[in-house]
Structure formats: C-alpha cells, structure tokens
Amino acid sequence: MKRVTLLAQVDPNICTGCKICEKVCPVYAIHVTDKKAKVTEDECRGCANCADRCPFHTITMVKREKPFTIGVDASKYDRDKINEICMKAHFNPEQVLCYCVGVRAEEVAAAILAGAKTPHEISSMTGIRTGCTIECIQTILRMLTAAGIELKPDPNGWQWYGQTVTAWTMPEDVKTKYNSRGFYFDEDRELLEEIARTGESN
C-alpha cells in the first residue's frame, strides 16, 4: 500500500513542452498537449520523477488536499494463482520487490490477476516503481512474463527495457568461464529457489 500525498504541478509559463516529463513518468500521468505539460491529477502517484528531471524547473511537487491510498489486496485473489505466478518468476509471494514503497510479489501478482498487463498499469495499481522509479522495472517484467503476458515495446517507445540476466537465464558459457574465478552461479540459484519456496507448504 502507498499513501499518495503529493501531486505534480506544472507552471505553464515556464513549460516548453519538451516531453521529458512524459518519458519519465512511471504511470503516464503527465502528457504534453499544445506544447504544455498537463497532469492527470487522479493518476499522479507523487513520485516526483517529472519534477526531478525537468530541465527548466517547470514542475513542483505540492501537498494534495485529499491524499489517498493505492494498493491491491492480495487476499481477495486466488492464492494458488498468486503463488503460481510468483514461483514462475522465482519470487517468494511475501518477498519485497519494491523497497521504496514496500510492495510484495503477491501484490504484483494480484494486480496482474486484476487485469494489469503493462508495467505502468501495475505501478499505478500498487505503487511499485513510484519511489526511486528505477530498479523495480525488472521485477515487474519478470512477473508479467511469469504470468504468460507477452511483453511488447511501449507504444511511445519509452520505458520498456529488456530483462537483465538472472541466475536462471545465465548463459552456460558465461557460467563456465567465471565459475573458476570464485563465482557460484548454480549455488546462488539454488539458494534463491529455496527462498522462493519458503513457507510454500503453509
């Protein structure tokens, strides 16, 4: 759960319509229309990514008059399906995927079961990737892939990055090359799988 207390506010007298804010918003709550950025207030998650990256200091974060909470209650969704998605992604359902906001794997799985099919939809529903806005894209992509959702490039060409290599996708030649140098890829994978299975029988 995330308490959204801030709102991005644009000064139209300064805005040049450069669209950087559009490109960096993890939930696509800001769009440039008629060369001016405009915020869809009920979609903004208060991450300040747009304000931090605006080269003209056009955007400021202000306190909302009516803060609200976002999140997906995992208990309302089929536990077996949640566990299945998490296990396929090699995450324990209770594993924290976003330390900035505290979103767990089970909540992301629940968002997917609720209909989310893209990173920005999951971020909007759960708050994941609305803290630092950087690291959590990888965990989201892994969860979507595990759910059988085909990942396609963002229609605007922004923000959808390829998945990084994991312990499960490490090429064999790379493992062979570095195993003799003190790396333990297979042992790491076994440990991660054990963590994912922890509490599975409860």
Image: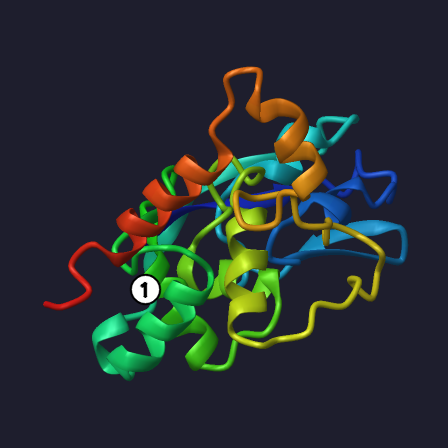
61 up-or-down from 120: above or below: above
Above or below 156: residue 148: below
Q: Quadrant of residue 44?
A: bottom right
The residue at 54%/38% (across/down) is 135
**Residue visible at 34% across and 64% down?**
107
In this view, the residue farthest toward the left is 202
Q: Amino acid at mark 1?
A: Glu
Q: Which of 173/142 is in front?
A: 173
**Is there any visible trace of residue 92 in the rendered image?**
yes
Q: Residue at x 59, y 61 (%)?
A: 119
Residue 1 seen in the current view: no
Query: Is 76 situated above or below 33?
Result: below
The residue most toward the top is 181
User: Seen in the image, is 83 located left or right of residue 160?
Assistant: left
Q: Which quadrant of the structure image shows residue 84?
A: bottom left
Residue at left offset 15%, top offset 59%: 199
Give the residue at mark 1: 106
In the rendered structure, the answer to whether residue 25 lies left or right of residue 101 reads right
